[in-house]
Amino acid sequence: MWLSDGRLVLPNQVIERGSLCIEDGQIAKIIEGPIPHADLSLRGLTVFPGLVDMHGDMLEREIEPRPRALFPIDVSLYELDKRMVGAGVTTAFAAISFHWHSHVRLRSEEWARQIIDTVNRLRSGLLADFHIHARFEVTNPDAGPVLTELIRKKQVHLISLMDHTPGQGQYRDIERYIQTMIEWRKVRIGIEVTEEEMREHIQRTQDIPKSWDLVSEVARIAAQHHIPLASHDDDTTDKVEFVNSLGTTISEFPVTLEAARAAKRRGMHIAMGAPNALLGRSNTNNLSALAGIEAGVVDILAADYHPGAMLQAACNIAEQGILSLSQAANLVSLNPAHAIGLLDRGSLQVGKRADLVLVEMNGRPRIRATFRQGMPVFSDHSSIPLRTVEADPFAGQLTALERV
């Protein structure tokens, strides 16, 4: 199947008018210029590779959009799935917390297991290719054996080492942490706490020992199963050196430029939040993603909490001239795919999966259609089928894109 006359964003260049051929779910050919009698005209559209999101916190929020309003996991997953492909995300890592909280129903071993089981059970029928990203809190020793079991059962595909102890990492500023958590507990879980109660909570939290021996064992087993290991909220050179010695190859959301540079020197992949990059600042007053990109230490942008920010951030970075369009697109496609070992996707290249995002670039970028392995999984045009098993599913039906 030929898609003709679109602007193609390749890893190292942009073909202003190009065409590509899809065979068996892969990109078979890429040429410059339009071709006659193509199956689909891309005139007026820019083609990006399908976005790869290695860290998205949205599923838990989809399950509990308001305090104590718990939706069925499968319903929530199907709804998030549609949001992801509508945002151009064809590969998604759903972040699941391994940090048990007695006051947060979703933050428990029972719920973590249910969510992970549901994602893995339904993934073959989802529009995006979903994987599990386990957020392992190092102050929760009970999570270690659970995580080890799930690794061995091939139910987890990426692990991040988390330490949300107040006074370091993301929450180095204690006073800011207190105000943030008072607001978060009221809005997200419907519990009002006083400043005094928060200070007592901080003292209790800071007294909890960190299970580094257990973390080392989890890291060892993850390496045996070729599961990438990330660290979260690195704030110092010493912290980077330590987590890298455990086998981490990804630094997620470093909170200082010093830590990001230390990770870069060690050959680690550095991921920041796309919302941070789009808004131009960190919500917790830490390192700006744009500052990190300008300093040359950030190579991945993740959805974090907003999948729609990924493509918008990449296009905004290119428009500002911080990076070329190809380099900016790599932040949300090729680079995260490489970081997590998915070498079959993430770029418009012959032999790669035909995961494509068709975007109208007049003004604010608008995603018009998303393809996964050559099949349409999202379109904002009603005449394009979303699912089909016919040998030539596009014949006579996709010309409507010419009018987009």
Image: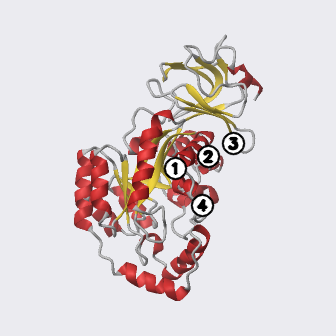
User: In front: 369, or 334?
Assistant: 369
* Whether label 2 touches label 3, CB < 8 Å: no
Of the image marks 4 and 2, the number of the one nearer the N terminus: 4
Tell me the CA gap for discs 3 and 1: 31 Å
Q: Report the mark closest to the observer, 3 or 1.
A: 1
Q: Work out how far the residue at label 3 is from the one at label 4, CA to CA, in angstroms.
A: 34 Å
Q: Position of residue 266 (x, y in %)?
A: 32, 55
Q: Are marks 1 and 4 in contact (CB under 8 Å)?
A: no
Q: Amino acid at mark 2?
A: Ala
Amino acid on which disc 4 is placed:
Ala
Q: Earlier in the sequence, mark 3 or mark 1?
A: 1
Using the image, determine if residue 337 lies above or below residue 209.
above
- As drawn, the label of residue 50 is none
Q: Which amino acid type is shown beneath numbered disc 3?
A: Pro
Horizontal arrangement in the rendering, residue 27 relative to residue 275 (left or right): left
List x then y, in percent, for residue 125: 50, 33
Residue for badge 2: 318
Of helix, strand and loop, which one carries label 3? loop
Name the residue tied to disc 4: 69
Above/below status of 288 relative to 325: below
Tell which tag, 4 or 2, sits nearer the viewer: 4
x and y, in percent, of residue 33 in the image: 63, 19
Q: Earlier in the sequence, mark 2 or mark 3?
A: 2
State the residue position of label 3: 365
Q: Amino acid at mark 1?
A: Ile
Residue 19 quadrant: top right
Circle 4 SS class: loop
Mark 1 or mark 2, earlier in chain: 1
